[in-house]
């Protein structure tokens, strides 16, 4: 078995009201960061997966995201896997 | 009428709900811990109370929706049994996909704890049958994630199927809709019912507008009255009101 570190990023879907993102963007811009736009505030989840290879580790991460980590009505996610020594 | 009130770690309206139901003479009420496999006795009504189950970790209601007792709640709902989710209970029902939609953070990003007026949009449900049609009632709200959201197409379908039971309203003009929603809820939606008409979720708290010695009225009694009538509970002599 190999060990992989999964980094999962969950963000509100386009079209879903992201009041936190809007508030953060407004505050950033009022602090002089006028170059900033399109702020979305989401969630970052990191965990370790044991699997025979990277593709089966990916399947486990996807299943965990579908089951719990992501509410696919309002959120979408991306993830990366890195094999641990 | 036998009610099972499910208690999750972080529930804080479970006893209020029990007291409201008992005050209406609608016992018995079983308090059921979330890790149980089932109910001690088959309930007529399953109630998911308000609170902050699992500290609102991940998403409000997300962890509670996957707890052990929810298999029994789902089975009860699937067999046509009545389920009522109040506030966090509504959030749990959407996370469990027993009701459509999601509850997002309030549009003003604040926790709102306030008296609140809602209009009864449907009185042909077991939960609302004793309310006059389109009556405006006061049930308090206390939540941070109460902005009801559905993508536009699904929202239209929800409205076409008349699944909206409660809508935020102006107590004077009796108009209801988005402009009257304190939390930014789409179409001013405060409570919805399943397509089959047996699962109801609402953000406002009827159990906080039930006991006569509390301030701010007793409009919530209409909801318990409806359930009691639905189950014929007022037609028999009152039985033993034991609480587990």
Image (cartoon, helix red, strand yellow):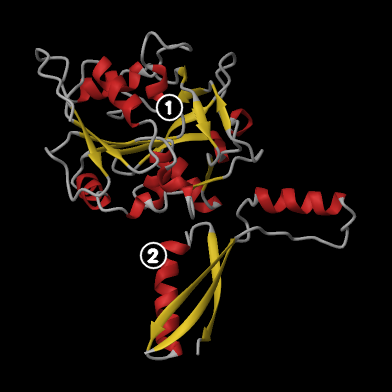
Closest to the observer: A48 or B70? A48
Q: Compared to B194, does A42 lie above or below?
A: below
Closest to the observer: B192 or A4? A4
Q: Please give the name of the residue rendered at 64% of the width and 52% of the height, measured from the top-left corner.
A: A18
Q: Please give the name of the residue rendered at 74% of the width and 61% of the height, measured from the top-left corner.
A: A38
Q: Quadrant of residue B41?
A: top left
Label 2 – label 1 distance at C-alpha: 29 Å
The single residue placed furthest to the top in the displayed view is: B213
Q: Please give the name of the residue rendered at 10% of the width and 19% of the height, measured from the top-left corner.
A: B240
| Left/right of residue A33 with respect to residue B232 in the rendered view | right
Badge 2 density bin: few <14, some 14–19, many ≥20, Cα 10 Å: few
Q: Chain of mark 2?
A: A
Q: Compared to B193, does B241 lie above or below?
A: above
- Which x, y percent locates residue B44? 18, 33
State which quarter of the image contains the C terminus of chain B: top left
Q: Which residue is mark 1?
A: B205
Closest to the observer: B95 or B15? B15
Q: Which residue is mark 2?
A: A67
State which quarter of the image contains the N terminus of chain B: top left
- Which x, y percent locates residue A48? 46, 77
| Left/right of residue B207 with respect to residue B115 in the rendered view | left
Q: Compared to A46, does A2 lie above or below?
A: below
């Amino acid at each position: 078995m190999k060990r992989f570190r999964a980094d999962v990023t969950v963000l509100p879907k386009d079209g879903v009201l992201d009041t936190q993102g809007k508030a953060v963007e407004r505050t950033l811009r009022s602090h002089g960061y006028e170059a900033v736009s399109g702020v979305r505030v989401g969630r970052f989840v990191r965990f370790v997966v044991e699997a025979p290879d990277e593709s089966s580790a990916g399947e486990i991460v996807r299943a965990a995201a579908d089951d719990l980590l992501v509410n696919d009505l309002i959120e979408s996610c991306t993830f990366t896997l890195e094999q641990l020594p | 009428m036998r009610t099972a009130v499910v208690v999750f770690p972080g529930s804080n309206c479970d006893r209020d709900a029990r007291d409201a139901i008992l005050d209406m003479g609608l016992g018995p009420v079983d308090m059921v811990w979330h890790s149980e496999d089932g109910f001690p006795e088959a309930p007529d009504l399953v109630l998911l109370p308000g609170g902050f189950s699992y500290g609102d970790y991940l998403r409000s209601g997300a962890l509670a929706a996957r707890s052990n007792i929810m298999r029994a709640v789902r089975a009860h709902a699937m067999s046509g049994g009545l389920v009522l989710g109040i506030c966090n209970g509504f959030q749990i029902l959407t996370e469990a996909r027993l009701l459509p939609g999601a509850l997002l953070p309030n549009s003003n990003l604040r926790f709102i704890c306030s008296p609140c007026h809602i209009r009864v949009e449907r009185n042909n449900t077991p939960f609302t049958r004793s309310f006059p049609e389109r009556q405006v009632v006061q049930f308090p709200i206390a939540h941070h994630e109460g902005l009801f959201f559905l993508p536009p197409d699904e929202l239209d379908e929800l409205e076409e199927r008349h699944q909206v039971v409660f809508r935020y309203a102006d107590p004077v003009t009796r108009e209801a809709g988005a402009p009257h929603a304190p939390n930014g809820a789409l179409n001013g939606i405060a409570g919805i019912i399943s397509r089959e008409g047996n699962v109801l979720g609402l953000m406002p708290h009827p159990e906080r507008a039930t006991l006569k010695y509390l301030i701010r009225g007793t409009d919530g009694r209409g909801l318990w009255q409806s359930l009691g009538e639905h189950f014929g509970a007022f037609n028999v002599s009152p039985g033993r009101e034991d609480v587990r």
